[in-house]
Every structure is written in structure tokens, then in C-alpha cells.
Image (cartoon, rainbow, N blue to C red):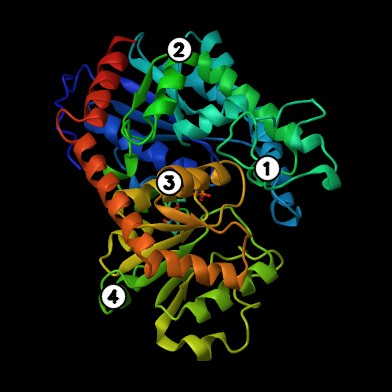
Amino acid sequence: METGLRSTQTRETRRRIILFPLPFQGHINPMLQLANILHTQGFKITIIHTEYNAPTHSNYPHFTFNSISDRFHEIEHQLPTIPAPDPGHFLNYLNRSCVDPFRDCLTGLLAESNKGSIACLITDAGFYFTQAVADTLKLPRMVLRTGSLSCTTAYGVLPIFSKSKNSCFNLTTEDLDYEATVPEYPLLKVKDVMKMTINPKSYGDFLTNMLKQMKSSSGIIWNTFKELEQPALKTICRDFPCPSFTIGPLNKYFSSSSSSLIEQDKTILTWLDTQAPKSVIYVSFGSAAQITKSEFQEVAHGLVNIGLPFLWVVRPRVVRGSEWLESLPERFQKEVGDRGHIVKWCPQQDVLAHPATGCFWTHNGWNSTLESICEGVPMVCSPSFTDQPINARYVSDVWKIGVLLEDGFERKGIQMAFRRVMMDKEGEEMRERISCLKKKVNLSLKKGGSSHQSLKSLIDYISLL
Ligand code: UDP
């Protein structure tokens, strides 16, 4: 997409921006989209990245890349063996293991460059250790927050970190009321917060550090648009001393295909071409969430029972303990025939934009949620961990553009949810609301729109750093 903004920098005066993404698909995509946007605005781009999940350099011949050691291989074997997600453990580890290699790399880049030719560093907000490094080297650090504004405001008040006896994480199972609302953030239920992590200490430490170092940064770039999250933006502007720029959705400027870590099966688009408009259910739980064998089988039974065409992304090892499709029910293929297709990974944005796609059964990663909004596709929500339960509540209870599977993966609930979205009047209303948001996205990106204006302010701001 054209930004419509004109770069004021000449080839000789072009300054450089150094970007450093967290090495996970949902973080790499928006960071590289941002890098492309900044490049179109006349900045030279250097990407520092970890060895783990390195982006494909050849897809970005206009960038310079620097790889650093992350020692992730020392704990990588723990990823599939842990029984439930402990994201804080991995995130805090990276924030320790990358310190020396990152500092050395940045010091080297500064030593090689002329004074003032590097405008700033932009890191993922989750790389909180980089603020201290940037301060020492006297380089302004901005952050890209790849999650939603609303989720960040929730993180600021949730009892994840609390040592209080009343925090849901400190109650015994018998004392827990999973359906109760969380007093600190009444939109959420106790079961939502409990899903975010099995290790509140490590995740709480991660969030505390991330929020603290976001506040110390020179500015925050948000992958969202103002019209979607106005109340949260107000809270952030009140509580965070640095400027905020809501320039998203970033996927509207550049597709995430070139930063995909897994090869996308594009042949599926030909099959979608043969399907009736808004008839297909697209199912994907993103790049990191895992489900159990029995949950996988409930998804399969649900898809058989619904009777609608579907495209199901089954990422290798998404089912704990399985390589790929071993746990599919025996009669599944016979029962669905050509009505259903399973692939390992697909060009998600193209699938969502396809006229045949009628609903997205999603884990509500923030990129997936935004991509669905951008294409006006209502959702059925099966959040897994971290910010996903919060995003799902916003989709179902605030924006009312989807249905949350309150009881998890359970075939009866699945069937009812799809009936509501695909067949009932309620679904039509959701479709209208999300189409309205889609229009707002497009307006926000046009000249004079909120994201367009915010991008202009961001470029002016960086130019003065
Ligand atoms: N994605 C993709 N192909 C797929 C499934 C997902 O390209 O088959 C992309 C999707 O478009 C999104 C990203 O992977 O940009 C997933 O990010 P998200 O924040 O939704 O979830 P995460 O993977 O971080 O849990």
C-alpha cells in the first residue's frame, strides 16, 4: 500500500534505523512490515536478529542484516515437552542470553557509522533488556508493541504479579470460581487470566520489565488503529510518559508472506475459488499454540458435524505428542471428502481476503485478529495463552464480532458457535459490525485518517531524534 507520505531525505542524507524483532512469527511479521514502511519513508534499514527463527534475507535485498547468537538451542528442546505454556520462561531467557551479543553488535554498528547517521533503535517491546544497552550507548530506543493497546492496559492492572492471597493464581483449585469476573479488569473472567500462563511468576516478571522499559523508551509504535481502541489509547497516553503512535494495521501496508518462517501452501487459493461466497470456515491456531490429542479430535468432529466447507491449517507438532495428522479420527477423511482441506501453513491474509471465506476459527493472536478485522471476517475464538484470552474477550464481548468457545474444544459448543456465526441473525449482525470496522481501517489509512496522520507524526518525530 502507498503511504502517500513523501520522504524528505535525499539519497545522501538518508539516516539509518536499526530494528530488533523478538524471534517468533507473530512478532517478526509486524516488525518487518514496519521496517518496510520506514524504508519507503527514506530510512536505511538494519535488522539485528537472533539465530533462532532468522528471517529470510533474500526476501529483503534492500535491508542489511546482522545475526546474533541467542543460545536458544540450549532450551529449545523444552518447547514441546512442557505440558502447558510457560512463555515467561522463554522470553526472560532471551532477555538474558542476548545481552552481550546484542550490545557487541550495536556497539560495532555505531562505531562503523558517522555521528548522527543512526536515527534510533526500534526493538520489540518484549526485548526489555535493550533499553539499558541503548541508554549506555546514548542511542534513542523506541519500541514496537506487537500486541493490542487494550491488552497492554490489562497487563498493567491484572493480578498476575500479585502476591495477595486473593489473586486467582494464589487460590487453591477448590476456592477458584472460574466464571467470576476479575475485579481489576471486569471484562475478563478468572478462567481467562488463568489461561495466560502456568507460571505467573515468570510471566509476571516479564510483563513488569516490559511495561517498565516501555515507559522509559523514547516512544511506542502500536500495531492498531485509533478507532478500534480509543479508551485504551486514552489510558496509555495518561499512564505512559513517552509518545504513542497508532499507525496500524501494519499488515495493510505490506503482507506478512515474505516474513513467513514456514512455507505457505498457495495451491489452496485455487480450491477456494471453487467455493461459494462466504461459505468456508478457515481454521488456524497460529504459530505457537498447541492443543492436546483430544482437543484436536473435538475440532475434527466439530468440522464434520458443522457440514460446511473448511480449510484447516494443522501446523506440524501443533498437537502435543504428534508429528502431524496421526490423531485424526479414522473416518474423518471419508466423512468430509472434498468439503474440507488440511494444509500445514497457508497465505493467511490471502485466505481471509478471499470472497469464499465466511468465518475464521482462530486462537486470537493479535495479528490474526487484526487481519480478520481488515477483511471483515467474523471469528470463532479459541484462545490459548498470553494475550489471546484478552483479545478473544474484546472480539466477543466488546466489539461483538465473534463468538468465544467458553467451554474450550467441545463438539456441541463448537457446532452451536458456528450456527450462531454462519446461520443466525446474530451472525449477520456480527458481519455488519466487522464490515463497519473494515471500512474504518481503510479510512484510517487514507490521507487525513488517524493512522496516516500518526505515521506522519512518527516520521517527523524520528527525523528529529
Ligand atoms: N500465518 C500464516 N499462515 C498460517 C497461519 C498464520 O502466514 O497458516 C501468519 C498470520 O497471517 C499472522 C501470523 O502468522 O500474521 C500469526 O501471528 P498471530 O499474532 O496471529 O499469532 P501467533 O502465531 O503469534 O500466536
The reply to whether discs 1 and 4 touch (Cβ–Cβ < 8 Å) is: no
- Dot 2 surroundings within 10 Å: few (below 14), some, or many (20 or more)? some
User: What secondary structure is marked by label 1?
Assistant: loop
Where is mark 1, residue-wise?
180
Indicate the position of residue 237 as horizontal and vertical percent values. 42, 17
Q: Is residue 328 above or below residue 187?
A: below
Please give the residue where the numbered disc 4 appears in the rendered image. Answer: 270
Labelled pair 2, 1 in contact (Cβ < 8 Å): no
Which residue lies under the disc numbered 2? 139
Foreground label between 2 and 4: 4
- Around disc 3, counting alpha carbons within 10 Å, would you say few (fewer than 14), some (14 to 19), or many (20 or more)? many
Q: Which residue is mark 3?
A: 367
Cα distance, mark 2 to mark 4? 49 Å
Q: Position of residue 408 (x, y in %)?
A: 62, 60
Q: Residue at x 81, y 35 (%)?
A: 170
Instruction: Return the residue found at the far front.
Output: 425
**Upstream in the sequence, badge 4 or badge 3?**
4
The amino acid on which the numbered mark 2 sits, given as a three-letter code, is Leu
Which dot, 4 or 3, sits closer to the camera?
Answer: 3
Q: Amino acid at mark 1?
A: Ala
Identify the residue shown where x is 33% and y is 39%. 250
